[in-house]
Amino acid sequence: MIGVIGIILSLGLLIYLAYRGWSIILLAPILALLASAFAIFEGGDFHGLAIYTEAFMTSLGNYVKAYFPIFMLGAIFGKLMDASGSADAIATFISEKAGKGKELWAIVLACAVITYGGVSLFVAAFAIYPIGAALFRQAGIPKRILPPAIALGAFTFTMTAIPGTPQIQNAIPMQYFGTDGFAAPILGIIAAAIMLFGGMLWLTWRKNKAMAAGEGYGEHKEEKLTIMDREKLPPFGIAIAPIILVIASNYIFSKFIFQDMDASYLEQYGTTLSKVIGDWSLIVSLIIGVLVAIICNYKRMGSVVEVLKEGVAGSFLAIMNTASEVGYGNVIKTLAGFTILANVMLNTFENPLIGEAISSSVLAGITGSASGGLSIALETFAPTFLERAGEAGISPEVLHRVASVACGGMDTLPHNGAVITLLAVTGMSHKQCYLNIGMCTVIIPLISCAVIIALGSIGIV
């Protein structure tokens, strides 16, 4: 029991101090060691620095190995979209076509389109931020509303709920329940609608309240975004082309080109094509997008070398924050107290959908990762969920959709890597933005999960 207290204390401090602006890179290993130290009080072993060097740093290193190319290329791509004037051109086009007052919808739906197209939510943050900043600046909308708008479009319904989404949170349950990405489509659409419209109602109210009080975009001296004269902006077709190419290329490479290649040589690297095809497709797609952005806008950007250097530099803090959070979560999940927590969540409720939702969501909150929490929950409890669901006449498809939606609730607590990355990219703080981010990515998704649990329990699929 003392081990459980250690985990709760460690997690509470991580959330509080992250909200107060402390560095996750500094906090994560210290608080992972704190939680591990509580093993001493239960007669266990505390391995001291080995936990840091061998457990925490190994997990951090594996994450950097797997995702640094995506972070780096995503940051470069976003910087090129800004420096070339493409972000401003897209923002101008959207504001003219959508009309005044539709800027929030434009940003949320832009994020939704590219993440549903398979682009990583981290890349969405890099790519959409300069567009959103230009659009919000033109409309006089407070910048603190922008990170929640990006989070709503990228971190919620397209990540977990919409049938067929290629995001990993929708793929993980397939191997455990024998389902596909379109499982329980009615429940998925209902959950997505609650997240989208609930989030939009909240953000619209918050935006209108702030603007009525006289708050504008604000002065952000640290913001290094390019502002061009309108006559120098690229045409909309040229501005949007790199984004379209990234989405289209990602689909083509993942579904066709890489699928047909002979990748038997990967055995010598200890992996398989199915494990790397998603990353490979996105890396190649981002390279194509970067090259096209440079070729189409070479004369508009000044020094391309400087733009590339700024993009690379911008990726370092983002990936290290997220990787540190992953290291923390992987240390926590090895502790005996974590197993106790997991078993309590499993056995508290007879309804398998409620038990599944609680375990997926809470474990995602503890690890700071939707996919991490979901993987742990299903790896540990999927057979039990299937057995209880069969006894209750509940379809495996419903289990799939509830698990996927549930992991996208408490995952975005203040210490979450994606939240920290988003705030770092936009140059904002938890204090300025987290109330709205939390409402859109934690509270409303949890409400949507409760609704589909109720509907799934009566046979709606």
Image: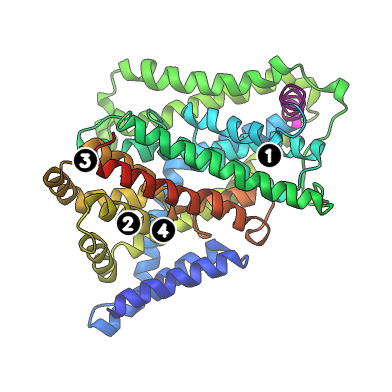
Which mark is on residue 309? 1
Residue at x-position 26% and y-position 55% = 355
**Gap between marks 3 and 2, in whole Å?**
17 Å
**Gap between marks 4 and 3, in whole Å?**
21 Å
Say whether disc 4 or disc 3 marks the residue closer to the N-terminus. Answer: 3
Say whether disc 2 or disc 4 marks the residue closer to the N-terminus. Answer: 2
Say whether disc 1 or disc 2 marks the residue closer to the N-terminus. Answer: 1
Say whether disc 3 or disc 2 marks the residue closer to the N-terminus. Answer: 3
Q: Where is residue 281 in the image (x, y as percent from the top left)?
A: 44, 26
**Gap between marks 3 and 1, in whole Å?**
43 Å
- The C terminus is located in which quarter? top left
Q: Which amino acid does label 1 sit on?
A: Lys
List the residue tagged with mark 2: 358
- Bounds of the magenta segment: 83-98
List the residue tagged with mark 4: 365
Instruction: Please determine whether, in this image, residue 199 is positioned above or below residue 416.
Output: above
Identify which residue, 198 or 132, lies in the foreground: 198
